[in-house]
Image (cartoon, rainbow, N blue to C red):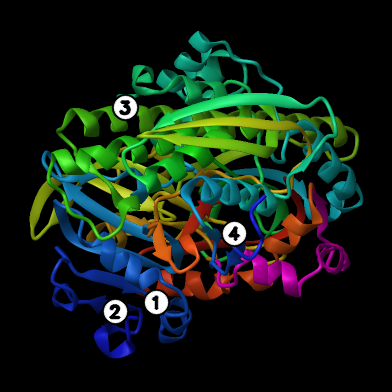
Amino acid sequence: MTSPLLSGYREVPHTADWELQVWAPDLSTLLEQAASGMYHLAGVKLNSYPRLNRRIELSYRDPEMLLIDFLTELVYLVDTEGIAFDEFELNLEGDRLIAELTGAPLASITKEVKAVTYHNLTIRITNRGMEANIVFDV
Amino acid sequence: MIRLQDLQQINTYEWEIPQTYRSDMRVPVRIFATRQLLEEIKGDKSLEQAVNAATLPGLVGQVVVMPDVHQGYGFPIGGVAGTRLPDGVISPGAIGYDINCGVRLLASQIEFEAAKPHLSDLATALDRFCPSGVGKKGHLRLKSAELDRVCREGSRWALRNGYASDADLSRTEENGCLQGADPTKISKRAKDRGRPQLGTLGAGNHFIEIDVVDKVFHTEAANVMGLLEGNLVVMIHCGSRGFGHQICSDYVKDFQSAVRRYNIHLPDRELVCAPLDSPEGQAYLGAMRCAANYAFTNRQVLAHFARKAFEDILPGKVSNWHLHQVYDIAHNMGKIETHQIDGKSIEVCVHRKGATRAFGPGFQGLPPEYRAIGQPVLVPGSMGTASWVLVGTPGSMQRSFGSTCHGAGRTMSRRAAKKSIWGEDLRKELQAQGIHIRAGSMAGLAEEAPQAYKDVDAVVETVAGAGIASKVARLRPVAVIKG
């Protein structure tokens, strides 16, 4: 597990929607933190069982697009199957992401994420690795 | 950061950011606001986003900013932009994820005093009949072919299936159906999300509200609409649910490549767009119209179940509990319309994001009874404050692509609202004011507190003062149902 000092997320004030700042030493951890941050903002609570597995494969042209696609996939699974994840095994191979996810059905959720936006989205290289600000339409 | 000295004041209600403000602007930005509202608007990034919007290829006239504007993502919420046909662009982000989010108003002859003892039961019944909240499924289960019919037919599907009357359709923007919807341009994922959600309210700032007609300002128009002081009305605010959200997400992704193909350079990736006459632009138009028709149908089905709720509670207690439709209007939509630009009549694609169509008297698309007064405009306020019924004017046709405001407009972030307001305290406060609340989440309720919004009365005074809408009636809430 990555140290919380090296990776994490925090909410940034936004007039109408949500903005999440996410940081991590590498891209796969950044994706994991972004997913955890999104679930946190949505007030996602998971049932203890049954535990569920999903495999997601995404190809991508740039890391920002991958970040959006990955989170959009998670929004879709919340909306259609009522499931979310708390264990992530993410492997980046060339221009592909292979994600093995483990989670459970939602026990409760307080907020609806309509969409993950590209608004001003740039994955920045910083002294702690990578950082991005993501705006969600809610 | 845009400063006051960067703006040119046109009159008490209008300001302009000239095209010379930034070299990549293609048109100026026209802001409808009083000085006080403008100071509030400058508190976030709305104006920077409007300047970014002014870089879209093929823009005509000016980018218009309404007094209820607030920062969004890419295009500001409360913005209007027109692009010329055939080679101007269409931008999914300038319409929004909740395609055809809009408002429906149903009026009644039920006197508030007669209904007052039953308001709590009515609120509970509305909450029971009209599913709301995150991930809630509706009473209907559509098969794929049926969803395609909803996409193509819009409110006509509801009429065929017993959820609507002819009068409902005639009093809906475009009679509840945009022509040119193409279900083959929609992904399986969007259909997966759309099938179980028809007839659901959703969450966030969406609501069903019972209001009282508090004051009439335009007697002739109010009489035509059936709005009588002291009587109850029902307002429904929602959109195209996960169906529209997925369609917009799909096309914002697709258009990331389209802008490269068409050599379009933009200051924000969320503004991605494609020429209206390109295969990509035409595909999005076909898909967006499906979501628009889904949203018209969604509000129609919710109206049907609101009527069922009234039928469940009021027989034997009031003499006439019928709810008749005043109007249904979108505030997130892209429409092909004809407007006068520089003295010439031209076809444009009007992007309205958080802005309401407000066509003036004489518009042929209105039902005959409304042609003399202009198109009804429905402006929901925040919980506990007024909502408004307005009508479009000749001024809106001349100066704002036939558009006006859509609500109060947020001024406080959701996080700040939750930090400073306890949902349960707010519920008690509203209850003490005689407003019955049914909410899925107290945190969600706090986020939508009246303190988080601008003064809707000031917004309406601005559009009325500027002449881009005219006041008909003010509504006062007495019951609010939120997801």
In the image, A54 versus B463, the foreground residue is A54
Badge 3 crowding class, 10 Å Cα cut-off, few under 14, some 14 to 19, many 20 or more, is many
For the residues labelled 2 and 1, the Cα–Cα distance comes to 7 Å
In the image, B470 versus B128, the foreground residue is B128
Which structural element holds mark 2? strand
Give the chain letter at badge 4.
Answer: A
At label 1, the amino acid type is Ala
At label 2, the amino acid type is Trp
For the residues labelled 4 and 3, the Cα–Cα distance comes to 42 Å
Which structural element holds mark 4? loop
Left-right relation of B209 to A132: right
Q: Position of residue B304 (x, y in %)?
A: 66, 28
Q: Position of residue A58 (x, y in %)?
A: 44, 30
At label 3, the amino acid type is Gly
Pointer 2 residue: B15
Magenta residues span B410-439
Badge 1 crowding class, 10 Å Cα cut-off, few under 14, some 14 to 19, many 20 or more, is many
Give the chain letter at badge 2.
Answer: B
Badge 4 crowding class, 10 Å Cα cut-off, few under 14, some 14 to 19, many 20 or more, is many
Which structural element holds mark 1? loop
Pointer 1 residue: B33
For the residues labelled 1 and 4, the Cα–Cα distance comes to 43 Å
Q: Quadrant of residue B72?
A: bottom left
Residue B286: give its label: 3
Left-right relation of B380 to B6: right
